[in-house]
Image (cartoon, helix red, strand yellow):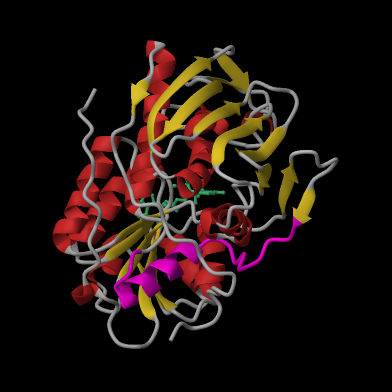
Amino acid sequence: MSTVRPVTPVTPVRRQQPAGHGPAGVAVIGCGNISRQYLANLTRFPDVAVVICADVDPGRAKAQAAAYGVPEWGSAGDALAHPGVQLIVNLTVPAAHAEVTGAAIAAGKHVWSEKPLTLDVGAGRALLRQAEAAGVRVGCAPDTVLGAGLQTARRLIDSGAIGTPLTALSLLQGPGPQSWHPDPEFLFAPGAGPLFDLGPYYLSVLATLFGPARRVAAVGRRPDESRVIGSGPRAGTAFGVAVSTYVAALAEYDAGQAASLLFSWDSPLTRAGFVEITGTEATLAVPDPNRFDGDVRVRRAGDDDWTVLPAEGAAAGRGTGVVDMVRAIRAGTRHRATGEMALHVLEMMTAIERSAASAAFEPVATRFEAPAPLGPQWDPYVAAD
Ligand SMILES: NC(=O)c1ccc[n+]([C@@H]2O[C@H](COP(=O)([O-])OP(=O)(O)OC[C@H]3O[C@@H](n4cnc5c(N)ncnc54)[C@H](O)[C@@H]3O)[C@@H](O)[C@H]2O)c1
């Protein structure tokens, strides 16, 4: 087990601001599935301009550039060498995240990465140190935490709507993605499973609301040695299961809160998107952490039913975190979905996995500064001053 040490937060450095007053030049590296959502949004946000699409598969880069009106396409090297690019959006597969982000930092670019930051904590910590030394920023998905739903919940909790927040309860359960995904093997391989595939959404919500965790404990189960693909051309094919498909975890936070978390692909009954925060005065139900929108519900002691509070703010989708990052770089302020928070979430997941094996509480050592909430008027579709 590697020694985990606190990471020094990246200090905003003005000399690395995106140049000029126009939109910041962005390169998208990795033109696969999720790039469609990013490109559809980033090409409509006025504070950024996508200048090049890149991929190891040139056909994909070319096709996405054509589909979204991006002027250039090429290799990752072309994107990194592009003088008009200030920020790289790394949408490659998780196994390539560390390499692509590291190369981007070495080229003097800021980086937004899809989750997870890296596959292991040591590689993530090394990237953040490299970025700090280079004076560039690292941001990381999920940026669903910047959506109207969670931000409304955050502002309500900050305003005292539930009293002092004490505990959280989160629930994700279902039969697992083998039923609908045509190539589900990677989702049952190390680095995936319900914990690593969907945990970032739930754990990032709690990180945003509670701040850093200090220790975790967990029980894991893997009832099936193999599963069978349920759809697509390979339906009926069996494949091996290498990870826990049921993970029940406890987390204790620095600020005193405790959380009970369930991540299961061993349930015929599907229940997802359930996160409740209980305080001294009321319980607040957070919208689905995998979405940018959704109502917030509050139930005070003695209430017969929930009070529904519509979400206020932008629910613009993936790429929201990139806009927040570009604006923060310009303003010399801290961006919200930081690499430090993503590293902490990654460490929580690896500690949960270790605890399931060791049957002991595992410490979580990395720290991050909890992000400031977004105001309800914050809008990525309107250019910042
Ligand atoms: N697909 C989704 O619904 C979804 C949702 C949320 C997050 N994500 C995250 O987004 C990331 C990408 O997922 P995806 O579903 O788009 O995967 P994908 O396999 O569809 O696309 C990844 C692309 O990256 C390219 N690539 C791989 N290594 C590269 C390298 N070294 N240099 C340049 N290009 C490289 C591949 O050729 C491919 O086009 C993952 O981190 C995933 O966790 C995906």
Q: Residue furthest right?
A: 304
Task: State whether residue 216 appears in this view.
Answer: yes
Q: What is the quadrant of the C terminus in the image?
A: bottom left
Q: Classify residue 106 by image quadrant.
A: bottom left
Q: Residue at x 63, y 47 (%)?
A: 162
Label count reads 0
Task: State whether residue 185 appears in this view.
Answer: no
Q: Is residue 151 above or below residue 185?
A: below
The residue nearer to you, when weighing 175 against 282, is: 282
Is-magenta flag for residue 317? yes
Q: Is residue 82 above or below residue 115?
A: below
Is-magenta flag for residue 274? no
The residue nearer to you, when weighing 165 against 19, is: 165
The residue nearer to you, when weighing 171 against 109, is: 171
Q: Residue at x 42, y 25 (%)?
A: 216
Q: Locate residue 233, reporting x and y percent.
A: 66, 35
Q: Locate residue 348, reporting x and y percent.
A: 39, 33
Q: Locate residue 300, reporting x and y percent.
A: 73, 43
Q: Residue at x 75, y 26 (%)?
A: 269
Left or right: 182, with 114 as reference point:
right
Q: Locate residue 20, reporting x and y percent.
A: 30, 87
Magenta residue span: 309-334
Q: Is residue 39 above or below residue 97?
A: below
Q: Residue at x 41, y 46 (%)?
A: 93
Q: Residue furthest left?
A: 133
Q: What is the quadrant of the N terminus in the image?
A: top left
